[in-house]
Amino acid sequence: MFVVTEFALALTLLVGAGLMIESFARLQSVNAGFDATNVLQPIAAAITTIDFDHEQHLGSTLRQIAFEKAGILKPGVPAVLGRMAAEARHEIERVALERGAPLIDVAAGSSVAAARRSGLTELTLTTPIHRYGPLVMSLRGAHQIPNALVAARLLETLESRGVAVGVGAIESALRDARWPARLDLRTLPDERQLLIDGAHNPAGAAALSAYITEEWPAGLPIVFGAMADKDLPRMLNAIGPLARPLVLTSAPGKRAADPADLDRIARAAGIASIVEGPLRRAIETAWAHGPLIVVAGSLYLAGAVMKELDLTW
């Protein structure tokens, strides 16, 4: 599925490639198989990955979630399929066969060469159609590598169906794509820094954890706040061990988890934490432990910290 980052990457690629909005309206992403995206008749589609989130709406197993995501598949409309667990892939393939939707396996005939460079990824993509790079991707994190391949293959599919794109436009978009609040490193005028990440589910928390482990293996001060209906134990187990320290705050909104409840969950997992209710106090407490901090756990929290620090989107 296209979650926030992947959807943003594809959209940025479309804009970077100079495509008309009417063309974008015919490219379909998915958040749920039977939601409003299905009023469109796309000319191409993509499912980047399947993981656990919104289980109350989509189901409690990967097969159930995959079935919902497969609502994007339409007869005769090609769909690029990213890497995912076998359970999810089998369900997508079953529905595609049933509906007559041709699938394009992103890995078939493609290869990726990647290396880290100053927190970013130097990337070369080779597909059955084109070679892209070497170039330095603007979006951070190893999880963006397979997403970039899906996006490139999707745009190639659009091109095969009459939408002019071009290698140069795709390379430019990969270099310049930007998505606020997703491994978003900001520097304030006083040189203090923060890495803002809207990771709001276990998969997002794992991606953030992997990035911190790669770049700052000793850990960083982390400010964490999330919605109460999320899988908080798994999120905190992914992020908490890297926190030096873990500072708990409240994200905006009625659904937000109480910092005291977050503290109980963290301590049950053996993770020490500092409870700070107000966001400003939480980030100042974190900065007292180092000039670079992380703020994560919710897009609502990400928006609030950007507003608090007068950061532009």
Image: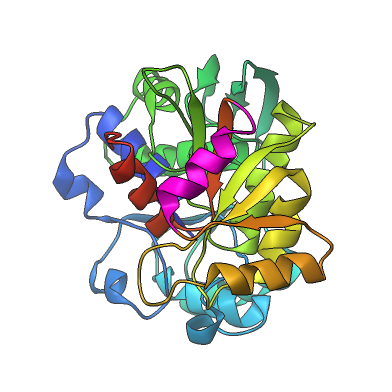
For the residue pair 115 and 186, the one nearer the viewer reads as 186
Quadrant of residue 158 within the rendered picture: top left
* Residue drawn at x 69%, y 60% as measured from the top left: 236
Q: Is residue 231 visible?
A: no
* Residue drawn at x 42%, y 76% as measured from the top left: 255
For the residue pair 93 and 100, the one nearer the viewer reads as 93
Image: 9 above or below 98? above
Q: Position of residue 100 (x, y in %)?
A: 48, 72
> Looking at the image, what colour scheme do you see?
rainbow
Which quarter of the rendering shows the C terminus? top left
Left of 216 or right of it: where is 139? left
Q: Magenta segment: does it hold 49? A: no
Q: Position of residue 244 (x, y in %)?
A: 72, 40
* Residue drawn at x 40%, y 26% as measured from the top left: 170
Numbered label tally: 0
Left of 235 or right of it: where is 70? left
Q: Position of residue 42 (x, y in %)?
A: 29, 60
Q: Position of residue 238 (x, y in %)?
A: 73, 55
For the residue pair 184 and 130, the one nearer the viewer reads as 184
Left of 12 or right of it: where is 181? right
- Majority secondary structure in the magenta region: helix
* Residue drawn at x 23%, y 73% as measured from the top left: 39
Q: Is residue 74 visible?
A: yes
Quadrant of residue 168 within the rendered picture: top left
Image: 188 above or below 308? above
Q: Magenta segment: does it hold 280? A: yes
Most distant residue in the right direction: 270
Q: Which residues are magenta?
A: 278-290
Left of 42 or right of it: where is 204? right
